[in-house]
Image (cartoon, rainbow, N blue to C red):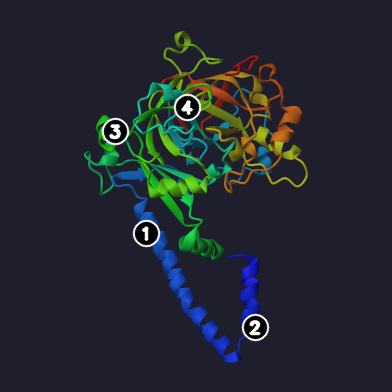
Amino acid sequence: MSSDTLAGLARHFLELEPSHKVFSIISALCCIPAVVTAIIYFSWVSKQENDPKGCTKLGLRTLSNLADEHAECYSEGSRQNHGTNRWRVKSLWIYPVKSCRGVELSQGTVISTGMQYDRQFSFARLQGGFPASSNVTDPAAGDEWKWKFITQRERPQLAQLRTEVWVPDPSVSTYSPDQANVQSSGVVVIKFPIEDGLWGWMSDVSVRLGGRAFERSLQVPFNPTEKQIKEQGYPKEKMTIWKDSPPSLMIASTTPSRSSPVMKELSRFLNISGSLGLFRVSDEREVYRCAPRKEELGYQSLVGFQDAYPLHILNLASVRDVGKRLIKGSPRLSALRFRCNILITGPEAYDEDNWKRIKIGESEYYVCCRTARCGLPNVDQITGVRDKTEPFQTLRSYRAIDPGAGKNACLGMQMVPALEESTIKVGDLIEVLETGEHYYLKQ
């Protein structure tokens, strides 16, 4: 409700007769319990609908490990000396849906494609007028359309999409080996704010009263079986991500054959014209460029819908140094804006620039190259609001340090795990095993 509308109502109220004013006040007070009851009921219903059967939600149950990221103790690091224990993993993150909000973990499993559950889904929009799922087989029309991934670079509203990963759990009462959610290795839930209509107004009231915004939710199987793919009719389409177009499963869309009310509402929320699709990794992409080769690793490094490499590591002291240099009046810079998997504390700012091989906990990792930065970190990862200049402007002023990246600023490092499967947890010690020069190779 706009300020002009409220002002108009206030003027109208003052013009009422005293008896009418009393009646209006009593009527308004009588409505409050109904509004509060509706808010509580809707919140409860939403919670029940978003609890996939047979599963437990993955993620922290406590305060975020980033709650104190702006504490002064993280502004300066220290040199690594023998016996030191200050270099540690501070926070761990997965991003089940590319460019949507992440899930913080206390520990996780690292596989050949990076953190388990990380970037296994991506939204894409259909470019061109030819509907990909219309089953038209005219080869002459094949190049007139394509699905292309979308990110916060062009749709900053994606930052407001909360994601949840629900994994099979035999200890819950609804668990059964034959349960659909168990068969698909879990469920991904995508939630987005309701903005329109009565529930949009009620959501606004809830927020003003100190509650949470109302949300719509979309549930999709994490890894559907061949039987589920056939039963649900999930088509496999080429989905373009940078220069690759891997065949990917279309799990949901707004195309005529697969449209749903939730996807249509989500499309409006993201301000998408044309068709919107949600894709799941089907064929992983092989990693080359600066990564160690199969002969050295013992396996072929792969990615799902990551931009280029399986893992992204970031030093909090480096983020804090960038934050100190932002133009006056800029909000405090959160490490969340850089969407890393592994956030560490202890090293001095930018010490990581020349790491080549490190050990985290009991496992080794190859540090392949620096992370070349685009304008995505300008997006606030909670509100979805994009800053016009920062931190992109400040980063480019002094962090264009890699000849291979040209004028692109660099912050953070890209990694490949030395093992096909290992475990990583918050508090793990960091040890640098090898340093050297880096040269960024573009796609």
* Circle 4/circle 2 CB separation < 8 Å: no
Q: Nearer the viewer, mark 3 or mark 4?
A: 4
What's the amino acid at mark 4? Glu
Residue under label 1: 45
Query: If you read the primary sequence from the N terminus, does the residue marked by circle 2 or circle 3 appear first?
Result: 2
Calculate the distance from the C-alpha at mark 4 to the C-alpha at mark 2.
62 Å
Calculate the distance from the C-alpha at mark 3 to the C-alpha at mark 4.
27 Å
Q: How many marks?
A: 4
Q: Nearer the viewer, mark 2 or mark 1?
A: 2
What's the amino acid at mark 2? Leu
Query: If you read the primary sequence from the N terminus, does the residue marked by circle 4 or circle 1 appear first?
Result: 1
Q: Nearer the viewer, mark 4 or mark 1?
A: 4
Residue under label 4: 144
Residue 112 in view of the camera: no
In which quadrant of the rendered view does residue 135 lie? top left
Query: If you read the primary sequence from the N terminus, does the residue marked by circle 4 or circle 2 appear first?
Result: 2
Disc 4 on helix, strand or loop?
helix
Image coordinates for residue 110, horizontal then vertical, percent: 44, 27
Crowd tier of the residue under label 3, counting other residues whose Cα lies within 10 Å: few below 14, some 14–19, many 20 or above: some
